[in-house]
Amino acid sequence: LSDRLVPLFYTRWMSFAVIVGFLGLRIALIQRHFFTLYILAIYVLNQVLLFVSPATEDDDLPGMSQLADRGNEYRPFVRALSEFRLWWRGFIAMVVAFLASFVDYLDLEVDGQALLLYFVVLFGYTMKQQITHMVKHGYVPWNTSKKATARRGDGKKDATYDV
């Protein structure tokens, strides 16, 4: 199944957006199951953090401090969680949360506004830590072209790339 779904990038993410829309509409209409939505948001946040994190921590590996002293050697960004697995885990979690919204036994009495506020604070704090980690270790979780990474600090291209 995954071999057939991997190339369908836009279709996969459109299906994710549709299930998010259905779940959001359902929660808005019934005005219940806020705790289910909160648990889902925490899980998706965790998966997104894995997606933007590198697969290995250089500080944790023995002998990596000597490799870090070599200079600005190009190392590609390898994710801890692939884009497909992020979509798959998120999609399955959305479907489970959508189905859980039909089970009244799983509806806990909570203040939805308090959970939203708590999630916003948690999201802000977590993203601040992640961005600090990115700056400290000098990586970005998106691909850049080799020409863009070869630019000097003054904005001029390296003469090696001139054709």
Image (cartoon, rainbow, N blue to C red):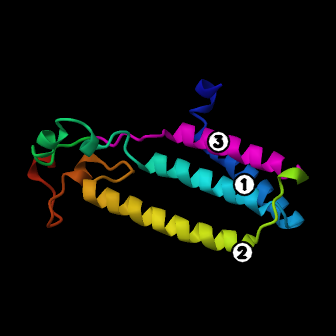
**Secondary structure type for disc 1:** helix
Task: Please give the name of the residue rendered at 19% of the width and 51% of the height, measured from the top-left corner.
Answer: 150
Query: Does the magenta run of residues contain 100?
Result: yes
Left or right: where 163 falls relative to 45: left
Q: Which amino acid is tagged 3?
A: Arg
- Image depth: mark 3 or mark 1 in front: 1
Report whether residue 163 is seen. Answer: no
- Magenta stretch, residue numbers: 76-103
**Which residue, given by chain and number where applicable, does mark 1 sit on?**
20
Question: Between disc 3 and disc 1, whose residue precedes?
Answer: 3
Using the numbered discs, state the Cα–Cα distance from disc 3 to disc 1 in whole angstroms.
Answer: 12 Å
**Which residue, given by chain and number where applicable, does mark 2 sit on?**
113
Is residue 106 or residue 138 the one in the foreground?
106
Question: Between disc 2 and disc 3, whose residue precedes?
Answer: 3
Instruction: Label the magenta part by its dominant secondary structure.
Output: helix
Query: Does the magenta run of residues contain 65?
Result: no
60 over 110 or under it: above or below: above
